[in-house]
Image: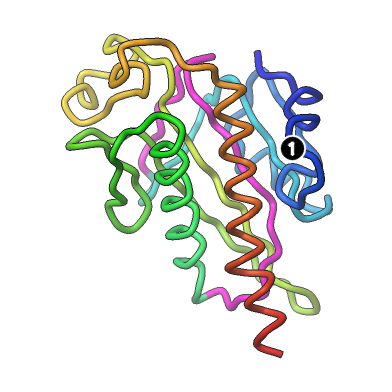
Amino acid sequence: MLDARRLRGALGECVIGREIVVLATTTSTNDAILQRADAAEGLVVFAEHQTAGRGQRSNVWESAAGKGLWFSILLRPKIDIAESGRLSTWAAETVGRTVEEEFHLTTRVKPPNDVYVGDRKIAGVLVEMRAQSRSPHRAIVGIGVNVNHTRDDFSNELRRRAASLSMLLGRDVDREQLAAALLRQLDRSYAALFVCSAHQAR
């Protein structure tokens, strides 16, 4: 099981990952963030298993227990609700870039929110925004990455179009190490795209 304390210690000073929670099971990590919506920006909730993981257009996201990285981030970007697509693009591109740097695989983002290696989906993003009248809108960025799945961990429907990093690499992947790399990249790129740009626009 992922260890929240070790993950936090691997990050140093940051916004994304300033607080990390690891749950054994939950309906979805986006739901778990909603239950903690008054927390500081940057809270990250991981779950080892989701019983009702969600994808785009109300699709079910299959979350094989202990095999992937399923996590959501609480953010308060200074953008309009109509610009939520920017968050989807940012998260998907950052996941793809991290996979390329960590594993030397060539990724592509299939708009609006899926990450592919070749013709196989390895990750997806789901952004949900909630309007706030007197403060920056609340955004929940949910990310799912197929890490150590075998072919049998996918349903018959998904086997032809989904893969895990382990299947592509021919070896198991250290999930905690990958989680830390993803959070570092997400924190760095979020600051550059949504924090620094907001200051420059003033």
**Where in the figure is residue 153, as x and y percent of width and height?**
34, 13
Does residue 18 sit above or below 60 in this rendering?
below
Three-letter code for the amino acid on which mark 1 is drawn: Leu
Q: Which residue is drawn at 45% across and 17% down?
A: 64
**Where in the figure is residue 126, as x and y percent of width and height?**
47, 49
Quarter of the image for residue 115 reads: top left
Question: Secondary structure under badge 1?
Answer: helix
Does residue 191 sit above or below 104 in this rendering?
below
Camera-nearest residue between 113 and 174:
174
Magenta span: predominant SS is loop
The question of residue 34 being in magenta is answered with no
Q: Mark 1 points at which residue?
A: 11
**Where in the figure is residue 132, as x and y percent of width and height?**
73, 72
Q: In the rendered view of the protein, which quadrant contains the C terminus?
A: bottom right
Does residue 132 sit above or below 110 in this rendering?
below
Camera-nearest residue between 146 and 95:
95
Instruction: Specify start and end residues of the magenta stretch as a single range.
Output: 59-81
Q: In this view, does 124 lie to the left or right of 187?
A: left
Q: Residue at x 40, y 29 (%)?
A: 103
**Where in the figure is residue 84, as x and y percent of width and height?**
51, 67
Does residue 127 sit above or below 122 in this rendering?
below
The question of residue 60 being in magenta is answered with yes
Render colour scheme? rainbow
Camera-nearest residue between 27 and 77:
77
Q: In this view, does 97 lie to the left or right of 78?
A: left
Q: In the rendered view of the protein, which quadrant contains the N terminus?
A: top right
